[in-house]
Amino acid sequence: MSGIDWRFYINDQLIDEPIGWDAVELSLQRSSTYYGLDIIYGKDLTFTGIGAELIKEAFSINDIDAELNFLVTSTCDDWNTSSLFFDGIINCTFYKESESEVSILIESSGLQRDFKNNLSIPVSMDAFESLNGSTLTSIYPYDIGLHSKDLIKRTKLAGGYNYSDSYTIINPDNLFCILPFGEIQGDELDGANLALFPTITSDRQNTNPGYVFKAKEAVDLEISYDFVGSIRERFAADRSYYLAIHYRIGPPFEGPHPTLIDLGLKDLFGNTTMNQPINSQGTLNISLPEGGEFYIFIQFFHFFYSTSVVLNSTITVNFSKCDLTFKAVTKEKPSITKGIQLYEAFYKISEYITGVTDCFRSNFFGRLNSVIPYSQNGCGAWVALTNGLNIRNMLDKEGNKFPIVCSFEDLYNACNAIWPLGLKIERENGKEYIRIEPRSYFFNPQAIISLPNVSGITTSPNPEDYYNQFECGYSKTNLNTGGINGIDEFNSIRNYSIPKNKAQKKLSAVSDIATSGYLIEQTRRAQFSELPTTDFETDNDLFFICLNTSEVTSDLYTDPPEVTTYQAGEVSERDENFSSITNLISPETVYNLRISPVRMAKNWYPVIRGTIVNKTNPVLKFLSGTFNYQVESTLLYACNNSIGTDKEDQDLNDSVVEDSTPIYEPIIYEFEYPLSFPEFNSIANNSEKAIAFSCNGSNYQIGFIKSLSYQPNTEGGIASFKLIKGSCAVGSFDEGFDDGFNIGNC
């Protein structure tokens, strides 16, 4: 035997060693989802004596609902230094009684078990009690100021498709003809009107053809036109025509009228035909006051050289295309939303699903002023979680704001898409915590143990970590109506190729929590609509909002504007952390540029880099994207790989990514090696750190545990290692290293 002394307790009562404990196997397994390591305990155990009686009694009272605490302590010398080895439960769902014995399954208890069982449960950020009824820490969402983002709104009139109409003329004549707009294709500006040409009377000079747009409020318009057609007339006489397309801003209609398209003066003689083509595209910029009207029409002014001609001619107008688009940049007053910062969101959900107070830690999301203060603000700080109902300030029947609801799983997955993360349950001073940190935290190149003279090493590629494609970004970008605002949105999807010909696998990092500035603004403006309480498409969608990272003074968060100083985390971030932003409409009112897809890709680059570590010129090549991937910006906020100038469609390589060192390489090393129980415990308690190993006592390589199997009661304590290759830099290795040892010699 290994010389380990064990003691076993059921509900704090000392019992005999269960049958099967001498063959129990311990295993460290790296999660393929969360990248932290779990300690897994093997096979069922069989209890006799007092242990069996305690289990039988509990089962007789509560059958499969019975649970008993099972505790194991260990020591290698005397009981004065005994330490907790296992704290779990006996699960009576797997109860099996045979004469004086009871066979049953043991499971880890407490935080880890409840956490894993309840990952997908939706949690309200307003909750004050946990699942098991315990009181939660008093942290709740708070009001966050939201600035107004400029939105482009459009109204389009379209028609003229094979349109034809004829007009009888007199001599002389001044005829006005409305253009044949056949339908309204969207009216975001709420001002469209399909003007009808009135009956032509002898008073044609003052005939009003009707307006095609009326401003609901004062607005600057860019009007685009696209006209394709012709004007035709045939008559046996000498005559002259002047043709033009005019526009008019507001009544009265009397001329003269500004000319949009001058079709010129036509002199015709005898029995000839006038066939004037129209093929004109362009833009017109005007300003309309509130209630101002816009008219557009064709004017025919003509006369016959012979005054004896009175009536007998017709003009035929044909259009195959007649489109008119009104576009305006609009702004709405600022507002507030209820939101909760990411650290507090994870903290609250963790308490709720486990029933354990103060059980979450993260340097990455922590802040100087988070519920558990940290010595500095993490790179994932200053981002808030909210939802559509709160962005548009909806209230329930009791006049309260709606709760923000999210599961741990959904929040983690969305954050992991932006910053590749890892998670594990760790113990500190006897208390367990859920810890979330960047992926690199769980692949720490500091070696926790050195294994010299390892023999029988098997090396093989790890297919799970080879990719030839990468996609990142955000799944929801714009309302189903689409439009120009969606086209300008940059927080959408990006696709890259990875130069690995034999791999046929895509790595996907797409967040289902929205960050689109246009989607935020469209949702925000719903509160100012004529029907503010009507259901809106994004009501139940979750959103991330980047917040100001330091003190900011602005008048853009109040109505009427008032210069106000805000502390970090009190208002939405705009462009204050950027020295330049180009190829974006209204960059000064941007939302969430700090977590744009190219910066997501840069965060993921060290994860992907191991796949192409042997390439001479490794490059993550941009292939395609949705909506606006021409945005270029320079970020001053120095965190991770996010600082610097980036364009959304740029390729990524070592020269543009600040920290391009591979976190690990997709190579697996397998071998067996003798391990003492204290050594196993040391590895288990520092599972994020590397294992240094060598086949000859020098030229050490480092690897990270993928799995480690160990039987503590077997003589010699042979352990089976499966390690993920670590990236090394050249350096000498000292056998006397301690935890400060960083990287071995490759």
Image: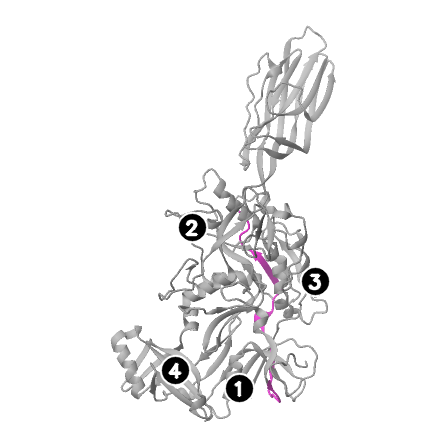
Q: Which residue lies under the disc numbered 1?
A: 679
Q: Is residue 126 left or right of residue 476?
A: left
Name the residue: 27% across, 81% down: 56
2 or 1: tag closer to the N-terminus: 2
Q: Quadrant of the C terminus?
A: bottom right
| CA neighbours of label 2 inside 10 A, class few (<14), some (14 to 19), many (20+) | some
Q: CA distance from mark 2 to mark 1?
A: 54 Å
Mark 4 and mark 1: span between their CA atoms? 21 Å
Alpha carbons under labels 4 and 2: distance apart = 46 Å
The amino acid sitting under disc 3 is Val
Determine if residue 512 is in view.
Answer: no
Which portion, as a residue range, is magenta? 450-478
Disc 2 to disc 1: CB gap under 8 Å: no
Looking at the picture, which amino acid does disc 1 mark? Glu
- Label 3 vs label 2: CA separation? 44 Å
* Tag nearer the camera, 3 or 2: 2
| Residue under label 4 | 71
Three-letter amino acid code of the residue under disc 4:
Leu
Q: Quick one: quadrant of the N terminus?
A: bottom left
Do residues under tags 1 and 3 come within 8 Å of each other at their CB atoms?
no
Residue neighbourhood size for the residue with mark 3, other residues' Cα within 10 Å, grouped as few (<14), some (14–19), many (≥20): some
